Amino acid sequence: MRETSDAITVIEGSRERENLPTVIVDDPQDLAVLLADRMVEIIEGEVAAKGKCVLGLATGSTPVGIYRELIRRYEAGEVDFSQVVTFNLDEYYPMSPYSIHSYRLYMMENLFAHINLDPRNIHIPDGSVPRKKLEAHCQAYEDAIREAGGIDFQILGIGRSGHIGFNEPGSSPDSRARLITLDTITRRDAASDFFGEDNVPLEAITMGIASIGDAREIALIATGEHKAPIVRRAVEGTVSPDVSATYLQHHRNAIVYLDLAAAGELTRMKTPWVLEPVEWTPGMIEDAVVWLAEETGNAILKLTARDYRENHLSPLLNRYPNAGEINGEVFIRLREKIQGRAKLPRGQRVLVFSPHPDDDVISMGGILRKLWENDNEIVVAYMTSGNIAVFDHDVQRHLDFVARAAPALDLDETKVRGLRREIDEGFNTKQLGDVDSERVQSLKRYIRESEAVSAIAAVGLPRTAARFLNMPFYRTGEVRKRPIDEEDVEIVTELLRDCRPDLIFVAGDLSDPHGTHRLCRAAIDQALERHDGEPAVWLYRGAWEEWTLTQADVLVPLSQEELRRKILAIFKHQSQKDVAPFPGGYDDREFWQRVESRNLDTAARADRLGLAEYYAMEAYRIE
């Protein structure tokens, strides 16, 4: 692969246990640049050699960055798509090509409408074909790929069930294009795109394992820590029909591209010392000793020289006079991370960025109260409205209250009834996935805002601490969002100028299913580059994961009562209670249940390591 125009650091390490060539980079955007580089190189080479290039394309959240990078390069005159032929992997069935859920629309919005690709060269499985004609349609799709000369470069994502395309567990390595029944995990992961799991199609048309395997080069791409376990099985596991991605181990030219989060469970990332000599930095030592304690079931201060020798850590042991020296060093480092209210910042200007209107109390409900009690000046900035995550019935419930309260509020009862009737009629004729009217979008926004204000009040902050940014990138009315642009960045920049924070909190979650956290983080980073001050930056996790004890720089202990208050604050977000529209497909629990489990588990892990025993803990990382 040729060198990229940007400086991208590829993470090195022993690949001894990896059965597929694997490229690991720091940031998902680096993957987009690397893959766009490779695709441009292949397009140029194949068009020069044979007059055309055939690409196999994928959908989902993972390839979006690649497509945006390709569009940028096309607009800059760096690539020509006029001689490119494309074949998409799959499509839901049944599915109208005009549905907002169709992969045809996805490809038009995210790539095809922005480049000079000949529409006659676009091929996507047709989810509207009558069932009796499906077999012939699938065969015709295979024939079209063969007549085009085969696929030169195929992009793949990987599902949590290990599927590539929609080749679910049990798929044969000889399979070709066909109709397949979707796995429960796959449908659950797609639930938020369809506004509920019940609305996800039961079937899909997919290219088969053999069809994919015919491609001359394959790039399997994964981002986010929720993909890490299945990535490890695909890369380090044995070939098995239970994980379709493992079949790629037999391909002559398949490469796996990962960000750090998705690579987190690979041996060379999680426990590199079992493979090769490592540089024993303080962080690496901490990782190794905590891993050893958990592996052996011993508290840190009880680890013995024998424990080190029997678990690949003799090189670390040899650096110290005895095991006790290592144990003590790491124990002190971990103990110093624990910061109760007395050790937390006092008398500072604190700015909390919350991507959605509930991320603040979900992730920071404990520390927020402590910071307020420490006389800090706090502003909580809710970056998006979160309105697409409000059910229609919640709007109707609030409208019912307004209609009943109209006399007490001196409202025009006739006008209120008319507006309510108009909105009810809109809901009755609304089809799945239809974008709400601007009025309804505003009502859903106000529901989320009122809940957010109530939630921060529940942890002790004044209602005036809330700022609602309503960032433009989110205002599509759809699950899919626009890229961050200048208007978004300027909104954040102006807030920084106004607040002049000494300390800011930012969502560092890498598992947000629709990437809103990543987009918000990008806007903050760009705004900070323009900002005159240099505030300290603390990263919290969102509703899906938590920093581990070794990843965290600050551990904030919570009492039973403090955790209870935090959960009650989360309850104030009633539109997200019981059944949240976008809970993230890989965890069925409600947000408060995840929080309770996560905070309890962090404290329990610290206790098992021999640290002071606390009821619960929040974890933060300092940039």
Image: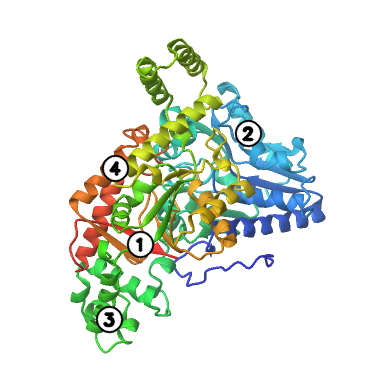
- Nearest to N terminus: mark 1 or mark 4: 1
Q: Secondary structure at mark 4?
A: helix
State the separation of the CA atoms marked 1 and 2: 52 Å
Q: Quadrant of residue 118?
A: top right
Q: Which disc number belongs to residue 105?
A: 2
- Nearest to N terminus: mark 4 or mark 2: 2
* Label 4, residues with CA under 10 Å away: few <14, some 14-19, many ≥20: many
* Label 2, residues with CA under 10 Å away: few <14, some 14-19, many ≥20: some
Position of residue 396 relative to residue 116, above or below, is: above
In the image, what residue type sits under mark 4?
Ala
- Nearest to N terminus: mark 1 or mark 2: 2
Q: Secondary structure at mark 1?
A: loop
Indicate which label's residue lies in the foreground, 3 or 4: 4
- Residue at 46% x, 41% y is 168
Position of residue 39 relative to residue 269, above or below, is: above
In the image, what residue type sits under mark 1?
Gly
Indicate which label's residue lies in the foreground, 1 or 3: 1
Q: Which disc number belongs to residue 326?
A: 3
- Answer with left or right where residue 265 lies relative to residue 74: left
